Amino acid sequence: MPEKTIQYVPPALLDANILRLKARLMAMVAPELQKLPALQQNRATVRAALEKALDSLNLPGMPPKVRGEILDAALADLVGYGPLELLLADSEISEIMVNNARLTFVERSGELYETDIQFENDEHVMRIIDRILLPLGRRVDYDNPTADARLPDGSRVNVAIPPVAVDGPNLTIRKFLQTKMTMADLVSLGTVNRYMATFLEACVISRMNILITGNTSSGKSTMLNILSTFIPNHERIVTIEDAVELQLKQRHVVRLETKLPNVDGTGAVTVRDLVRNALRMRPDRLVVGEVRGGETLDMLQAMNTGHSGSLTTLHANSPRDAIARLETMALMSGLDLPVSALRRQIASALNLIVHMNRLQDGTRKAIQITEVVGMESDIVTLTDIFKFVQSGVNTDGKVLGELRPTGIRPMFNPRLEMAGFKLGGEIFGAGL
């Protein structure tokens, strides 16, 4: 067992006799449920049937708490998400990772924990996977062993089963957190400092084109969500996502979501399709959840043709790596463009790169805020405006360091001033 573990299963449900009782209850109500139309197999109906079955067994000495835990567990297995419901109910959990029937991990408050959650066997895991996928018209099988889906609350689900998943079916759930974070929250968490927060707000309102980069689970989507809150309420915003996560509160928002192909492989609607369509919808701003293919070129062209103030994210290890990845993905558009032309597109389209990182202690920080200055010969020139300078790691494993300005003002500072933001020298580290 790893050093960090967390317990979720009520003690009663670890007792073999209690588990046998739960299985017996489910077997008692199953024939009755099969007679009901699908619409009537809801939680209220099923719970009533379970309570009736439990009462018929005449177990007067059972503590009310244990009774409730048995009913909850049986209900979850019959019409819910089984053992996962204990994890989905924890608001502190951001990610659930079922490696196999016997091994489940969670990310909670930025740290990874092993849990005591277990499924009965691989078939039990598959039942829960089917319960997630089938209402969406999706399924996984030997020929199609992977799938992406979304729970009703917006949480993202990825599924992989044998033969590609060697140790049995597994699923990963990126939870849709109901608590909407603000820039003030990021400041209090140390993700950014107050000068960076002021600068980023000014950049969004002043219609800078911003690319948010980072590795997996580094906080890119959270930063995108927060930056989008600074877009003025009167502007028309079109958002494009694989799975809807953005929680924009402005009134003039059109949300577009990709569509997976039908069983016969037709009918897919990609991010690139939606970007092209969005340009015909008179957007003031485009907000693309993530660029990862040919839509990159369409996004860059949109930024270059009047859609300033657009926002998007990209998987990359650094701002410089992000430029290289943008080149590669733009080439996936199928257009035969010289690399020098692509670099000019990138240099003229982007104003700012916000690079996120999940540090070794689990904390997330905007470790670089970098201006895309322009071209020098055939190279896209970048200048760091803010950086995280690490000074060490303490005895508890916590990363020590400071988010600080580099002392350089961005070349687009006059545009900020024209929009009404006269940022003082202290924000950019005057005197450093």
Image (spheres, rainbow, N blue to C red):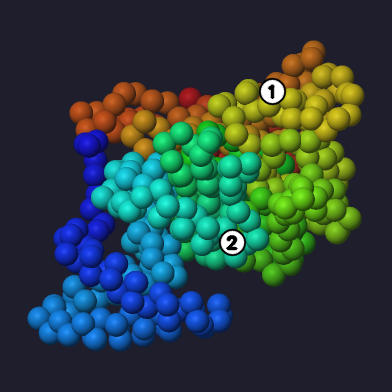
Residue for point 26% across, 31% down: 397
Q: Secondary structure at mark 2?
A: helix
Q: Is residue 411 left or right of residue 23?
A: right
Q: Tell me if mark 2 has few (under 14), some (14-19) or many (20+) residues whose alpha carbon lies within 10 angstroms of its own.
A: few
Q: What residue is shown with label 2?
A: 134
Residue found farthest to the left = 61
Q: Is residue 235 left or right of residue 92?
A: right
- Give residue 81's position: percent from left, percent from top: 43, 62
Residue for point 23% across, 53% down: 7
Q: Secondary structure at mark 1?
A: helix
Q: Is residue 79 above or below residue 342?
A: below
- Give residue 213's position: percent from left, percent from top: 59, 35
Figure quadrant of residue 282: bottom right
Figure quadrant of residue 27: bottom left
The number of discs equals 2
Q: Amino acid at mark 2?
A: Leu
Residue for point 50% across, 81% down: 35
- Give residue 409's position: percent from left, percent from top: 62, 31
Q: Amino acid at mark 1?
A: Ala
Real-space Cα separation, disc 1 to disc 2, in angstroms: 39 Å
Q: Tell me if mark 1 has few (under 14), some (14-19) or many (20+) residues whose alpha carbon lies within 10 angstroms of its own.
A: some
Residue 229 in view, yes or no: no
Q: Is residue 143 above or below residue 50?
A: above
The disc placed on residue 238 is none
Marked residue nearer the N-terminal end (1 or 2): 2
Residue for point 24% across, 40% down: 4
In-front residue for pair 59/368: 59
Q: What residue is shown with label 1?
A: 324
Q: Is residue 192 left or right of residue 1?
A: right
In-front residue for pair 190/174: 174
* Dot in front, 1 or 2: 2
